[in-house]
């Protein structure tokens, strides 16, 4: 889990991860207050996000900040 903890060089885990992704050519964009999780069900399926699509209360404080993507080979 990435957080704002600072290492000995004064860099956060988030900054280190972003620098690594940028170095290999990935474009990144920070979205604050986004709630997400990663689930890998097997070698052919991947879900990034929350698995409460049907039970989420859309009037909740963080409802607009939920996102998910599912991949199946």
Image (cartoon, rainbow, N blue to C red):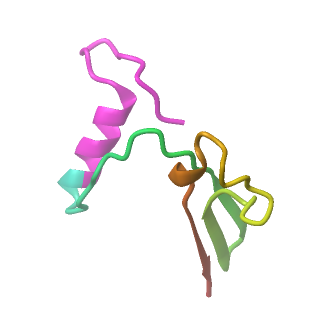
Magenta-colored stretch includes residue 18 = yes
Q: Residue at x 58, y 43 (%)?
A: 62
In this picture, is 28 found above or below 42?
above
- Residue extending farthest to the front is 59
Q: Quadrant of residue 72?
A: bottom right
- Quarter of the image with the N terminus in it: top right
Q: Is residue 36 left or right of residue 32?
A: right
In this picture, is 2 found above or below 50?
above
In this picture, is 37 found above or below 39?
above
Residue closest to the eye, 55 or 12? 55
Q: Residue at x 68, y 59 (%)?
A: 39
Q: Residue at x 56, y 45 (%)?
A: 35
User: Magenta segment range?
Assistant: 1-21
Q: Residue at x 37, y 46 (%)?
A: 31
- Quarter of the image with the C terminus in it: bottom right
Q: Count the marks: how many? A: 0
Q: Position of residue 4 (x, y in %)?
A: 40, 23
In this picture, is 44 found above or below 34?
below
- Residue extending farthest to the bottom is 73
Residue closest to the eye, 37 or 32? 32
Q: Is residue 52 left or right of residue 68?
A: right
Q: Quadrant of residue 48?
A: bottom right
């Amino acid at each position: 889990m990435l957080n704002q903890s600072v290492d000995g060089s004064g860099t956060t885990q988030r900054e280190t991860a972003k620098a690594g992704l940028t170095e290999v050519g990935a474009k990144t964009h920070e979205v604050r207050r986004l709630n997400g999780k990663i689930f890998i069900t097997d070698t052919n399926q991947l879900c990034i996000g929350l698995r409460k699509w049907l039970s989420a209360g859309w009037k909740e404080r963080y409802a607009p900040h939920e996102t998910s993507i599912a991949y199946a080979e």
